[in-house]
Image (cartoon, grey):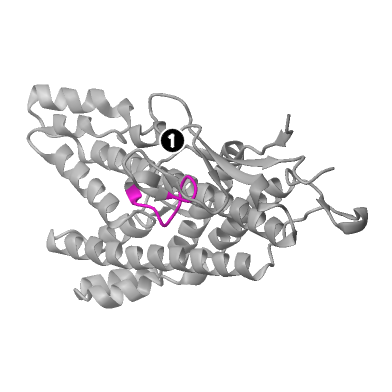
Amino acid sequence: MAVRRTTRINKLVDAWNPVLRKAFLESVYNMRDNAQLDLIIRYLSENDIENALRAVGIDPLQWIPWDKSVTATFEAGGIATAQVIPEIIHDGGFRTVFTFNVRNPAAERWLADRSGRMISDIVSDQLTMIRNFLRVGMERGNNPRTVALDLVGRINPATGRRENGVIGLTDSQAQWVRNYEDELRSESPLDALQRQLRDKRFDSIVKRAAESGEAIADSDIDAMVTSYTNRALRYRAENIARTEAMAALHEGQQQALAQALDAGIDPAAVGGIWRTAQDDRVRDSHEAMDGQRQPYGQPFISGDGNFLRYPGDPLAPAEETINCRCWLEPDIDFLAGVV
């Protein structure tokens, strides 16, 4: 019977997810720290949204921590896969132990393209979010300084860094924050209790206000919105980190297999098996894929008929990849070609 060795990408996702999450937040803090608060306030006072946006100083270079972590995650996927690839046996009995080369041209192209597009998308979304956030704040007649601080955050004396701002959130997530505050200030504050990212420690305050018909104190609303904003940022950091860990690790895995084939591994010995988390949170379309095996280079077919090269495939429809927890088990016949 053929012997097979496997590497569990799902365990690597769990290991690298916090690394990418930390790198994402570090890049967000870079954006906040570089914002020129006085200029933002000045231009908002003049109702000059575009120059206030420029004063925020969004720069792709602020995302260097993120870029480096994606590269490291990609390399980890390749190295882990290389460890289960058998020695290559050449004519005359010579053997070569396979090593993943992150400097391979194909690997470097993927890294440059993936990281570049991701950072470009993040920066573009941040510019849209910030412009809309500033515009809405001024249209509501809010104090320019308050709008600016709600955007970039307030300095934490203990860390010296800005916290609690909406920078780092997507445009839609910044809208969640505005809607949450509006609900707390409305005549029906109980609607705010439907939000999953709320801090439940404040629920009693909301319930008392609803029962008494009295408005929630501004100080309490500020505390609730601050907590909600922080939770929204952690939520985004977690989602984007897991999505990118899945993509980078699996792509590293695929690149390692491609390099092994180039080095002489028998293509017939290489395949992959789709594995799910095997719980009630697995998508129906992915549950139908559990255990599906495909030869290397052939896509997997989901229960909805979509093609995926691997879990988290950035080329697949979003409904097949967002919050996916599946993983690809490389299936290599370790004795193929051994006499």
Read off the magenta span.
308-318
Tell me if 120 is positioned left or right of 90 in this view.
left
Residue at the spot of label 1: 289
Q: Quadrant of the N terminus?
A: top right
Q: Secondary structure at mark 1?
A: loop
* Residue 56 in view, yes or no: yes
* Residue 160 in view, yes or no: no
Asked whether residue 183 is drawn in magenta, I would say: no
Above-or-below relation of 121 to 322: below
Residue 242: give x, y in percent of width and height: 48, 45
* Magenta span: chief secondary structure: loop
Q: Quadrant of the C terminus?
A: top right
Tell me if 285 is positioned left or right of 184 in this view.
right
Task: Identify the residue shown where x is 22% and y is 26%.
Answer: 205
Tell me if 271 is positioned left or right of 97 in this view.
left
Residue 219: give x, y in percent of width and height: 26, 39
Question: Residue 272 occupies which quadrant of the picture?
Answer: top right
Nearer the observer, 262 or 116:
262
Nearer the observer, 87 or 54:
87
